[in-house]
Image: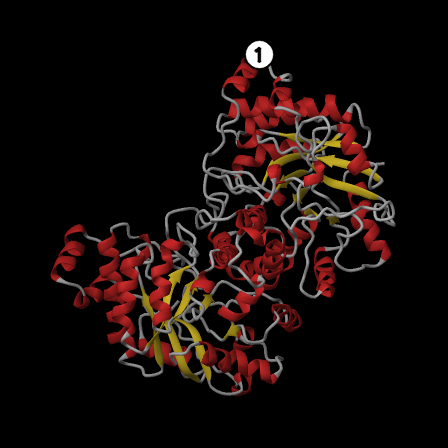
Amino acid sequence: MVQTLEQTAARRRTRYAVIDCDIHTAPKKPEVLGKYMPERWRRHHEQFGGRGHAGAYYPRANLNAARTDSWPPNGGPPGSDLDFLREQLLDGWGMDYGIMTPLVGSGGQINLEYGAAHATATNEWQKAEWMDLEPRLRGSICVAYEDPELTVKEIERQAGDKRFVQVLLSARTAEPLGRRKYWPMYEAAVAHDLPVAFHFGGSGGGPITASGWPSFYYEDHCGMPATFEAQVTSYVFEGVFDRFPTLKIVLIEGGFGWVPALKWRLDRAYSKLRDEVPTLQRKPSEYVESHFWITTQPMEEPQNPEHFKRIVENIGEDKLMFATDYPHWDFDAPDQALPVRLPEEVERKIMAENARAFYKLA
Amino acid sequence: MTETVALRVDPKLTGGPVIDCDLHCNVPKIEALFPYLSDFWREYCTQSAFRGPVDTAYPKGHKTTARPGSGSPPGSSVDLLREQALDPWNVEIGILTCSYAIESIHNPDTAANLAAAVNDWMAAEWLDKEPRLRGTIVIPVQQPEMAAAEIERVAKDRRFVQVHMPARSSMLYGNRHFHPIYEAAARHDLVIQMHFGGAPGNPPTPSGWPSHYVEEYVGMGQVCESQIMNIIAEGVFDRFPTLRWVVAEAGWAWVPAWMWRMDKEWKGLRREIPWVRDAPSEYMRRHMRWTLQPVDPPDVIQFLRIVEEMGSDELLLFSTDWPHWQWDTPEEALPPDLPDELRRKIAYNNARAFYHRL
C-alpha cells in the first residue's frame, strides 16, 4: 500500500545548511527543447525525436519514476515547473543551492549530430528557463559524449558561463570511460576547471549487465553499482589521472557502499598484475581517494547502521555530497537520509559544505 | 620459469585438515580428450584443426595463471597437484574445476560432446588417480537441456560434487532459460559453482570492453554481483529451495555492500518480485558461499569486519586456487590471526556442511 506521509513544518528543517547535488529538472514537453535548436534539427526533433538503443526499457516503480506528489500544477512532468520546484524542494527544505542534472538523453542518441544539437538545446534551456530565473540553481553541461569532437565543442561553448558546474554523462557508455576515445573531453574539462560527472542510467548499446539483460526494474535499479565499479576501474588502469592530474570525477546516484571493497580489490589486483599497467604512477586506491567525489542518494543502509560509519571513514568525510534525486520515487529527504548520526562537523560537510567547496559555491 | 616452489605450511595455520574448494586441472591439448570422443568428433577436430576452445580468462604467461613449476601446461599433472597443494596444506578433500571454455563454442553438439569428454577425462585421469580429489561437472551451459542431460549422466559418479558455470554469460543465470540445469543439480544434490571467467562473446562490463586483463580480473566481482541479483530476483531459490551456489575465485569483500544494496532496493520494489519473500541477503546466507581466494581485504582487521558484515561466519570456503598464484605465502592465503573457530569453519567445517556429496 502506498501512503503519503504528512510532512510537518518541523520535519522540513534540518539542523544544517543543505545543498542538493542531484535535481532532475525536465522540459514541460519535448517541443520546449526544440525552441533552442536550429531549424534543421528542430524539424528532426519534431519528426523523428530521440532514437536511443531500443530494448532497454523497464516499466518503473511509478510513472516517470517520480514521487506521486511531485506532479506540478503546470500540467507538465515532475521537475518541469520552477515555482513548484521552489515550493517543494528549494524553499521547502531551505536549500542553499541545487545542482541540476537533466536526464534528457542527449548522450545516448544514436544520431550523434542530433545528440549534440539536443545537448546544446538542453544547456540553453537550463540557462534561459532555470538559472536566469532562480539564482540558487546550478547547471550541468550535457554533451553527446560518444563523439569527442562534438563534446569538446559543447564544453567550449558553455564553459564561460560559470553557473555550469560540471560536464554530465550517463554511467552506461559505449566504452569504458577511461579509454582514449574520451580523453579530448577530459582535456577540455580540466582546461576549464570543470569536473566530469556521470549519473545513473544510460545505454551504450549493450545489455545493462556484463551477462545480458535482467528481467525486472528491481534489477535495472539495483544493479547500477556494477557499472560504476567498472568505470572507476577503467579510469584507474587506463592512467587517465596520470595524463590529467587535475581531473575530478563525480559519481552520481551509483551508491557508495561498494567503494571500500573495490579499493582493496584494485590494490590487490594491481599488486599481482602491475606488469600489465607498468606506467601507473600510484596505487589504485590513491587515485580513487584523490580524484572521485560521490553524491549520497541512494543512501547506503547497512544492516547494522553503525557500519555506515566505516564506509564514511574509508571514503573520507570530504568526499560525500548530499543529493535528493528529486523528483524521483527514491528521493532522500535531508532530515532522514543519514542512517546513523555522525559527528556534527561531518554531517555539515556531507549535507552542504563538501559540495560548497567542491563546486566553488558561495 | 621452471623452478619448483617448495611450499611449507605451518600446521597451526589451518588447525587441522582442510577442504580445498578451488583447485584447477587443465586439458593439456585437445588430443588428451580423444580417448573420450567418438570417431566423428575426433575427425571433426582433426580435419578442422580445432584445438579446442582457445579463449581463456587466464593470461597465458602470467603468474596469476600459474605458479612457477606448476606444470606445462600448468594444472596438468596430478603429481604436482599433490606436491604443491594437497600434501603441504593437509588437504583431506580437494575439489577440482576445469575452466575449459565450453561456453565459447557456438556449435551446440560440439559443446556438449567436448563437455562430456572433459568429464570422462577428469574422472579417469584425476579422480581415479587421487582419492582425495572430487570433481566439478563441466556442462554446455548455453544449452540448458543438453547441460541437464550431461548432469544426469555424470551425477551417478558420486565423486562429482558440483556443476561448473562460468561467471560471465550472455544471459543472466536467473533467467528461466537455465532452470533445467538447476532442476538436475537439485535432484542430485549437486552444488552450482559459479567460477571466475567465461568467454560468452559479449563485453565483460555493462559499458563495453576494457583494455586490460586487470580490469576484467577486478570486474569479475561485479559480474558475480549482477548474477546474484538476477538469480535471487528470478526466484531460483524459491523454485529450487534445496539448491546451493558457490561463487568461486571472484572475491568476497564486496558481498556485504551488495547485500545492503539488494536489501534496500527490495524494500522499495519488492512488489515487482513478490515471490522473493525474504530480504535478498537472507537468500545469500542460506544458499550461497564464497571461496577464499583471492583475499581482497588488506589486513586481518578488515577481513574480520567483512565477515561480521556478511552476518555469518559460515559463508567462506577455503581454497588455494592452485595453480593460480593469488598469494605468495600461506599466511597471505589464510590470515594467521583468525579466531580458532572461524579458522576451522573456513578451512573445513563450512565446506563439509555445504557440500552434501562429500
| Direction from residue A99 to residue B169 in the image, left or right | left
Residue A26 image position (x, y, % from top left): 66, 30
Q: Is residue A360 visible?
A: no
Residue B115: image quadrant is bottom left
Side (left or right) of B76 relative to B205: left
Q: Mark 1 = which residue?
A: A39
Residue at the spot 61% in from the left edge and 41% down from the top edge: A62
**Residue A233, how many percent across, how many down?**
56, 50
Identity of the amino acid at label 1? Glu
Disc count in the image? 1
Q: For mark 1, name the chain.
A: A
> Residue B150 appears in which quarter of the rendering?
bottom left
* Relative vertical location of residue A43 with respect to residue B135 in this rendering, above or below: above
Residue B31 higher or lower than A326, as above or below: below
> Measured from the top left, where is residue B198 in percent x and y?
39, 56
Secondary element under disc 1, as helix, strand or loop, is helix
Classify mark 1: residues with Cα within 10 Å, few (<14), some (14-19) or many (20+). few
The residue located at (53%, 56%) in the rendering is B274
Which quadrant would the C terminus of chain B be assigned to in this image? bottom left
Q: Residue at coordinates 48% horizontally, 55% vertically from top-left?
A: B230
Residue located at (47% from left, 80% from top): B353
- Expressed as whole percent of the image width and height from the top left, the position of residue A184 reads 58, 32
